């Protein structure tokens, strides 16, 4: 068996991509998708949990080692009465994909009345990389907070920083973009798009937490992104946090902040994908025991200004049209149903979230709509 040497986790050759905050010393490395200054602005523990999950975060380096070992401690998620969400590491070695499960870490258990915590322990993953020089991208679990506790390569093997230069794509969205239902972290629809288009992904898809918080516009604007996209609307409806009176103003304010910080970046607004529970019925949604959702019956809610996804699509179209007429021609919109429509409903098992095949469908259609002849096609 090869002799392995530990690499200090504060070694700058170990790149961390897709994270705007990293707590790093010689003993441990914990990425966060959001910068440290956002913590006091966090709306609550659910937001902090989702922002801490490493969707789109990857370790990136070049090595000649034929073996890599890594010690990871994940904090996973389980809804009471359901299986624990899978915590998967997707390793891309010169483009070839290998996956491993993490099973032994901490677990946050979310119940209807209370949230619990089950402690766990770190787990070691060993990857056989083969001979020669390899570019390694290790995509950390999209459904867990992940702490790196150890990093080992063959004794005498080369280690170098991965090359820079890819365009950065910053994407903000809901659980649809967070991608817990995807087959793995390199196979969420934003990750598939980034891999297909050769982009440096910053995935700010936050399950249940895409409510147009003003500080998130600042995060996107300060992220030095070449491309920015915003998947908007479904969380606002599902939690009934904004109404017709306030939604359009919140979108305008978000875009105003974003444009003040990133005046020239192409910005693509993505309206809600097909959502049978909310197409013509307002939220809020309630999660059912054992999985799935139902819309709460509120027969007079629409008259009081509650939104449906059909309303949101229309409003977003109007906002983008108005701002383009005012001169922001780098702003565009995609109808979410062109990415995932009623005809794709078989891949929507809980009637809200696309499954693994649904993520592949969305990625292929987004690549075609945004990159082939769309708003992201310009160099």
Image (cartoon, rainbow, N blue to C red):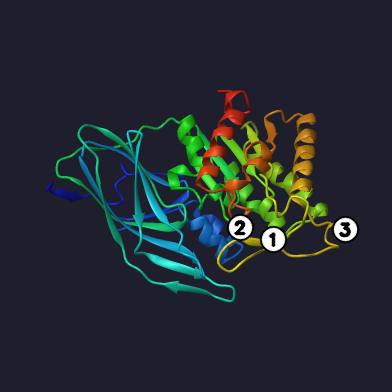
Q: Dot 1: few (<14), some (14–19), or many (≥20) neighbours within 10 Å? A: some
The secondary structure type at the circle numbered 2 is loop
User: In the rendered image, which quarter contains the C terminus?
Assistant: top right
The secondary structure type at the circle numbered 1 is loop
Q: CA distance from mark 1 to mark 2?
A: 8 Å
Q: Is residue 127 visible?
A: yes
Residue 310 rendering spot, x and y as whole percentages: 77, 46
Q: Dot 2: few (<14), some (14–19), or many (≥20) neighbours within 10 Å? A: some
Residue 200 rendering spot, x and y as whole percentages: 47, 36
Label 2 sits on residue: 208
**Quarter residue 319 falls in:** top right
The secondary structure type at the circle numbered 3 is helix
Is 175 displayed left or right of 260 in the figure? left
Question: Which callout, 3 or 2, points to the residue nearer the camera?
Answer: 3
Residue extending farthest right? 303
- Residue at image point 62% right, 42% down: 344
Q: Earlier in the sequence, mark 1 or mark 2?
A: 2
Q: CA distance from mark 3 to mark 1?
A: 17 Å
Q: Earlier in the sequence, mark 3 or mark 1?
A: 1
The mark total stands at 3
Residue 349 rendering spot, x and y as whole percentages: 58, 53
- Are the residues tagged 1 and 2 within 8 Å (C-beta)? yes
Per the rendering, the mark at residue 156 is none
Label 1 sits on residue: 239
Q: CA distance from mark 3 to mark 2?
A: 25 Å
Q: Dot 3: few (<14), some (14–19), or many (≥20) neighbours within 10 Å? A: few
Q: Is residue 212 visible?
A: no
- Residue at image point 36% right, 64% down: 105
Q: Earlier in the sequence, mark 3 or mark 2?
A: 2
Per the rendering, the mark at residue 303 is 3
- Residue at image point 21% right, 32% down: 132
Residue 311 rendering spot, x and y as whole percentages: 79, 47
């Amino acid at each position: 068996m090869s002799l392995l040497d530990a690499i200090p986790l504060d070694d700058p050759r170990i790149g961390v991509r897709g994270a705007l905050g990293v707590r790093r010393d010689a003993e441990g490395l914990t990425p966060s998708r959001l910068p440290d200054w956002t913590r006091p602005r966090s709306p609550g523990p659910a937001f902090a949990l989702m922002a801490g999950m490493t969707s789109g975060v990857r370790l990136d380096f070049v090595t000649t080692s034929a073996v890599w070992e890594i010690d990871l401690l994940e904090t996973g998620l389980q809804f009471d009465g359901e299986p624990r969400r899978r915590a998967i590491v997707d390793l891309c070695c010169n483009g070839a994909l290998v996956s491993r499960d993490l099973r032994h870490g901490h677990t946050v258990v979310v119940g209807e009345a209370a949230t619990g915590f089950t402690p766990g322990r770190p787990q070691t993953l060993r990857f056989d990389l083969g001979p020669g020089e390899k570019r390694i991208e290790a995509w950390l679990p999209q459904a867990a907070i992940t702490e790196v506790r150890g990093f080992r390569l063959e004794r005498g093997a080369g280690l170098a920083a991965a090359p820079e230069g890819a365009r950065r794509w910053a994407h903000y969205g809901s659980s649809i973009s967070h991608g817990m239902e995807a087959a793995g972290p390199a196979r969420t629809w934003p990750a598939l798009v980034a891999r297909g288009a050769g982009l440096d992904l910053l995935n700010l898809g936050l399950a249940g937490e895409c409510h147009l918080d003003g500080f998130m516009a600042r995060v996107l604007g300060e992220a030095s992104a070449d491309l920015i996209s915003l998947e908007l609307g479904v969380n606002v409806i599902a939690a009934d946090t904004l109404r017709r009176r306030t939604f359009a103003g919140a979108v305008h304010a978000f875009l105003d902040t974003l444009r003040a910080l990133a005046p020239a970046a192409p910005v693509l607004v993505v309206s809600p994908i097909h959502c049978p529970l909310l197409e013509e019925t307002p939220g809020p949604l309630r999660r059912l025991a054992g999985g799935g959702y139902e819309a709460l019956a509120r027969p007079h809610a629409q008259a009081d200004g509650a939104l449906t996804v059909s309303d949101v699509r229309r409003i977003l179209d109007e906002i983008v049209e108005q701002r383009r007429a005012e001169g922001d021609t780098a702003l565009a919109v995609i109808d979410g149903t062109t990415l995932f429509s009623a005809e794709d409903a078989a891949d929507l098992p809980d009637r809200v979230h696309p499954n693994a095949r649904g993520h592949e469908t969305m990625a292929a259609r987004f690549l075609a709509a945004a990159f082939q002849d769309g708003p992201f096609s310009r160099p």
